Amino acid sequence: MTIRHLKIFMKVAETENMTLAASQLYLAQSTVSQAIRELEEHYGVALFSRLSKRLYITVAGKHLLAYARTVVSKFDQLEYSMRKDSQIEHLRLGSTITVASCLLPQLLNKLEVCCPYTEFFSLTANTAAIEEKILNNELDIGIVEGNIKSTDLISLPLVDDYLVLACAADHPLASKKEVTSKELESFSFVMRENGSGTRELFLNSLKQNGISIRIKMVAPFPEAMRSAILFNGCLAVMSIRLLENEMKAGTVKVFRNCSGDWDRTFKLVYHKDTFITETISVLSNLLKKYKKPYYMKSSYERCIIL
C-alpha cells in the first residue's frame, strides 16, 4: 500500500466512478481498478459496493477515506517542508462573506507586504462551506464568524464583532429607542442563506426567546441585504461592520442587543494536523491587532429587548 494507492482511492471515492477517476488522474482505467483491488486485498475488506454499474462506498471505505485524507495531507506537508527552501509557499485562504466584505481586502494587502514569497488563493463562502473545504483539504485555513462543528478543526477567536438589527431611516421602527421581540413579528426580514454564521446566531437567539419572524427575502451578499433594508422595507440582522457608511449617512438606523447575545468573534480555523507556517503565524498576529467594531453613540442608545 502506497500514497499513490490512497490518492487513487480518494479520487474514486470523490467521483464514485472508476472511468471518471482515471480520466481526472490521467491514468488508464485498468490502473485505477487494479489499485482499488490491491487495497481491498491488502486490508481484506470491500471498499466499494458495485450495484447497477455504480459505486457506493462501504462503511470500511469511509473509515479508510478518513485516514487517507489525513495521511495524504501529512505526506503533502512533508513534501512541502522538504522543498520549502526552494519553492514559494502557497496559502489557500477561505473567508466568510461578512469577513470578505469588511476585513479581507486590507488583510490581504498586509499579508502580501509581510509575506512577499507567499502566493495567496482566496475563496469566499459561508461558514459551513469553509469548514467542509478545510476538512477536505481544499483550503488550508479559514476566517469565519460562525460556529465550527468538527472536532478535527482548531478554531481561534481573534476579532471582536457584533450583530445589530437594522432598518431604513423611514421605517416605522426608526424613531424608537427600544424594540421588543413582539414588534419583530409584525415586520418582514431579509436573511442570509443556510450555512451562514450570521443566520445561525440570529435564529438561535430567536428560538431561545420563543420569537417567530416572517422571512421575505434570502440574500447571500451584504449589498443585497442593504438594498432590501433601504428599498424593500425589510429588517435585517447583520454585522455592525457592514453598515458603517449607511450609519454615517443616516440612511440606516440600528438597534444593538445589549444583552450581549449577538456579540461574536471572527475565528481563525485550520485542521488540527496543519503545519503552522510562518505565513499562518503572520496572519494570526495581524488578526489579533485588528480594530474594534465600528462605534457610534446612537447605536448604543437604541436597543432591542428579547
Image (tube, rainbow, N blue to C red):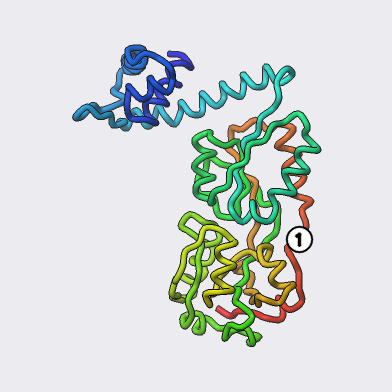
What is the total number of numbered labels drawn onto the structure image?
A: 1
The residue closer to the viewer here, 52 or 37, is 52
The residue closer to the viewer here, 168 or 32, is 168
Residue 296, above or below 286: below
Q: Position of residue 303 (x, y in %)?
A: 64, 79
The residue tagged 1 is: 292
The residue closer to the viewer here, 203 or 227, is 227
* Number of other residues with Cα within 10 Å of mark 1, as a class: few under 14, some 14 to 19, many 20 or more: few
Q: Residue, x 59% and y 84% (percent of image)?
A: 173
Q: Residue, x 47% and y 76% (percent of image)?
A: 188
Image quarter where the C terminus lies is bottom right
Residue 283, above or below 190: above
Label 1: state its secondary structure: loop
Q: Position of residue 229 (x, y in %)?
A: 57, 72
Q: Is residue 294 left or right of residue 213?
A: right
Q: Position of residue 90 (x, y in %)?
A: 66, 30
Query: Label 1 amino acid?
Result: Lys
Q: Residue, x 69% and y 63% (percent of image)?
A: 241
Quadrant assignment, res 21 = top left
Residue 57, above or below 36: below
The residue closer to the viewer here, 174 or 209, is 174
Image quarter where the N terminus lies is top left
Name of the residue lying farthest toward the front:
231
Quadrant assignment, res 165 = bottom right
Q: Position of residue 34 (x, y in %)?
A: 33, 12
